Amino acid sequence: MAATRGGAHDRAIRLTACAVLRRRVPALRLLTWNVWFGGHMLDERQAALLDELDRRRPDVIALQEVTPELHARLRATAALADAYELSDPDGDSLRDYGVLLLARGGLGRIDLVTLPSSMGRRLLVAELPGGLTVATVHLESTGDCVAERVAQLGLIQAYLDAAGDDVVLCGDFNFTPTDAAETAALDPRWVDVWPALRGGEPGYTVDTDVNTMRYQVKQKPTHKRIDRVLLRGARWQARSIELVGTVPFDDEGTFVSDHFGLEATLAAPGR
């Protein structure tokens, strides 16, 4: 997938400005979030999401379950459209829904990699100025898709091995740390940032004890950590990570998504 871009001169100016900015900023903040395409209070939830993204203004945003309608609202929100470059400015890659990256200051090379999937899942990879590669994915859903997720992880890791020494992979993995087959398929070089920094805290990104909206809609108690930030490489290190979207935004108990997001702070040595 080749995203539509401006002229080479404008591109060079943006990347130069980003490089200058990164020399002044000690860390990079990354937010990943499955924003849920479900119809429950969709307009209100999307509006609350846009407000939250604008309030937080992380350096990089990785979103899953982005619909063409949400993409259009992102493009129409001047505060975000002016501040971020989108991995797919026109939204042509999304189909019914998909993954999207947004970066303050610009993106380098962008690749969209087709995965073995009956759900149209793909890996989105982009180079950031400063030598970090960021990738986001939404692995195959449902509990009976173990073999599909294992195959997807194999392809993803082989692809990212060639992407550079410093890589962050984030998104909705649809398996927990106790799921043996998928966990065994993960390259041990990955640092799972949540347990690395937060120890034994559960870090549930799906938690119906807190997100009562999810329970009301799906009528099933669920507590699991399936959304992750994984980091590989010697130069970049994780400094912090927190859950995002853990409180309702209205008096009716509506949350932005049925998942919580994750915001991680990464830094290179000496920054």
Image (tube, rainbow, N blue to C red):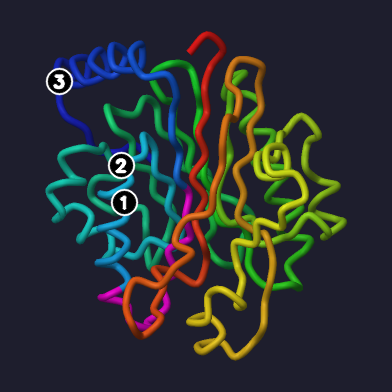
Could you tell me which residue is drawn at 42 percent across and 19 percent down? 26
> Along the line of sight, which residue is nearer the eye, 112 or 22?
22
Q: How far, Cα to Cα, is label 3 from label 2?
A: 23 Å
3 or 1: tag closer to the N-terminus: 3
Q: Amino acid at mark 3?
A: Asp
- Secondary structure beneath label 2: loop
Question: Label 1 near label 3: C-beta < 8 Å?
Answer: no
Residue 62 falls inside the magenta stretch:
no
Q: Amino acid at mark 2?
A: Arg
Q: Which residue is mark 3?
A: 10
Check disc 2 and report the residue beneath it: 57
Badge 1 amino acid:
Leu
Q: CA distance from mark 3 to mark 1?
A: 25 Å
Residue 206 is situated, as x and y percent measured from the top left of the image, at 60, 68
Residue 53 — which label? Answer: 1
**Screen quadrant of the N terminus:** top left
**Is the Cβ of the residue at disc 2 closer than 8 Å to that at disc 1?**
yes
Q: Which residues are magenta?
A: 32-44
Q: Is residue 197 above or below residue 116?
A: above
Q: Residue at x 56, y 56 (%)?
A: 138
| Total numbered labels placed on residues in the image | 3
Q: What kind of element bears circle 3?
A: helix
Q: Quadrant of residue 70?
A: bottom left
Q: Identify the residue at horizontal 29%, vertical 28% (top origin).
A: 106
Are the residues tagged 3 and 2 within 8 Å (C-beta)? Answer: no
Residue density around tag 3, few if under 14, some if 14–19, many if 20 or more, within 10 Å: few
Whether 44 is drawn above or below 178: the answer is below
